[in-house]
Image (spheres, rainbow, N blue to C red):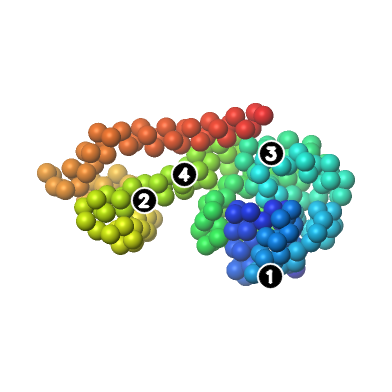
Amino acid sequence: MRKIGFIGCGNMGASMARAFTLSSYDLDLYLYDTDTEKCTNLSSEIGAQAVTTIETLVLQTDITILAVKPQILPLLYPILSKVKENHFFISIAAGVSINTLSKGLNSNQIIRFMPNIAASVSKAVTAIASSTNINELFFQTANNLALTCGTPFPLAENLFPAFIGISGSAIAFFYQFLHAVALGGTKEGIPYAQSLAIASQTFSGAIELMIKSGSSPQEIITKITSAAGTTIEGISALENGGMNAAVMNAVTASSQRAKDLEEN
């Protein structure tokens, strides 16, 4: 049995912990959060053990997952660096490099995850990068943990900002677009709840079709866009509104913010 600890029970940490409990792996989970009520409630929900100190959590676990906001990590370094030398850490903090983590944690066994909130339903896309001298068993275990959350993508660490732009942040862009499409349906007379349900199922089917057919988005668009038809009118309106440029700029803006965080 692998003993996995979470420092932080917020949205992302809780989503990953829930995914771990649904997996077939034999895991024993330990949770710590400064919000003891949140920690206790999540522990009861998923059958994990809540602990009252960070030191206890690290001492009792094989791998510790740092699921806190980037600005919190420097406050934890003085504690974490003294508990165990070269302890196995997985960090999901955006903008905090492996080099920075290694120095702060007194460990050369560091893996970075960049998941998204869909981990709670085991559909997250998770980028993975590791320190150069990583323990092979640790890396394989980490990859298996990422699999419980969805699909892992090993990436060079310098590509993490771009990954954030097309996954970590872009999941919110998708919801923004979905909401806008549903509003369009409501404008044309379909109640919002029904319009949202229709649009959601449409998008779900569209993704499944693309994956199973192996076709690119452009290939499918070409197939369903008839000359002088309804779809080309809608696409023309999107082009006139600058959708492609707006979305590309959104990805770039999120990526740039991630780069800025890396430099601080």
**Marks 3 and 4 in Cβ contact (< 8 Å):** no
Q: Residue at x 76, y 46 (%)?
A: 109
**Marks 4 and 1 in Cβ contact (< 8 Å):** no
Residue 32 appears at what percent x and percent y?
A: 74, 57
Given residues 16 and 186, the one toward you in this image is 186
Mark 2 residue element:
helix
Q: Earlier in the sequence, mark 4 or mark 1?
A: 1
Query: Which residue is disc 2 drawn over?
Result: 178
Query: Which residue is disc 3 drawn over?
Result: 71
Inspect the image, locate mark 3, and give the three-letter code of the amino acid beneath it.
Gln
Given residues 237 and 36, the one toward you in this image is 36
Badge 4 local density, few (<14 within 10 Å), some, or many (20+)?
Answer: some
Query: Which residue is disc 4 drawn over?
Result: 170
Disc 4 to disc 1, how far (Cα)? 32 Å
Query: Which residue is disc 1 drawn over?
Result: 44
Single out the mark in the foreground, 3 or 4: 3
